[in-house]
Image: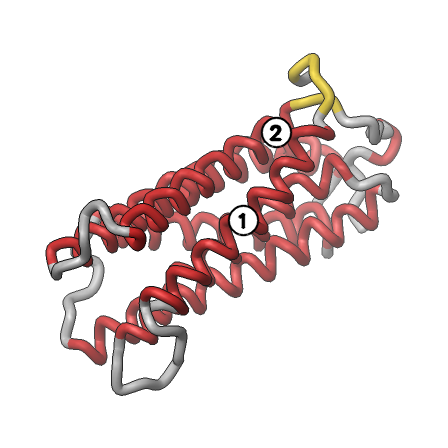
Amino acid sequence: MGLPVKAFPFTVVSHVLAIVALILVLVWAVHFRGGLAWEAVNKNLIFNIHPVLMLLGLIIIGGEAIISYKSLPLRKEVKKVIHLVLHGVALALGIVGIWAAFKNHNESGIPNLYSLHSWIGIGVIALYGVQWVYGLVTFFYPGGSADLRRASLPWHVVVGISVYILAVGNSALGFLEKLTFLESGGVDKYGSEAFLVNFTAIITIVFGASVLLSVASHHSVQEHDADAYTAI
């Protein structure tokens, strides 16, 4: 079941938007915000790691991981490995990105976890981690029973998509929160930086939507029921 349209156009659009979103957030972090650094006198350079890694990890690579399982013309066992690895990379980048935000706050004397964005972010990374670990032990290694995998698969899909939607929505909150702080500090509300941040947020949302449309549409790669619930 799925949308009665071909997934290929949505998949191509997703890849293009991913590149555009990454370029835009790098332009923002490097050109407008001064660059990225793990150790710096200017603590804002530490924070700049946060939006770059969160967008690259949970949003872009996470989205590509979702698309890869349905779109790649490979054996299911290979697609499962790619799906698992991409999500693992996304999770690792997300953890480092959140760590960068905490590091910036701690070294700048800024309180942690005071905003809705930060609360949702902790929830997203926790759910992402649980989802990844459960997928690893149930569908990959050591692999649950056939009945467990069959019962878990719909929930794995629904929870995974839900967490991804939360991540995309929370990224928009993050862009809004940071831009609001910058504008209160003197950044022109109608200037090029404000325009860039808002446009990056819009591209991110459209990318997320294209990922969902891609996986909900008809793929030329057909699944085989015979190995639908086999562990590797």
Outermost residue, front direction?
191
**Along the horizontal axis of the image, is 55 left or right of 87?**
left
> Which quarter of the rendering shows the N terminus?
top right
Identify the element where label 2 is drawn.
Answer: helix
Q: Which mark is residue 62?
A: none
Determine which of the numbered discs, if any, sits on residue 154 in the image: 2
Q: Nearer the viewer, residue 122 or 52?
A: 52
146 horizontally vs 46: left or right: right
Figure quadrant of residue 154: top right
Labels in figure, total = 2
Structure colour scheme: secondary structure
Residue 129 appears in view:
no
Q: Which amino acid type is shown beneath numbered disc 2?
A: Pro
**Residue at screen point 26% across, 86% down:** 41
Q: Nearer the viewer, residue 138 or 13?
A: 13
Q: Which residue is at 53% across, 35% downward?
A: 161
Counting from the top left corner in percent of width and height, residue 139 is at 70, 46
The amino acid pointed to by label 1 is Val
First in sequence, mark 2 or 1: give its number: 1
> At numbered mark 1, what does the secondary structure look like: helix, strand or loop?
helix
Report if residue 64 is visible in the image.
yes
Q: Could you tell me residue 142's position as x and y percent?
A: 73, 55
Residue 39 x, y percent position in the rendering: 35, 85
- Left-right relation of 14 to 101: right
Q: Position of residue 82 (x, y in %)?
A: 73, 53
Residue denoted by label 1? 20
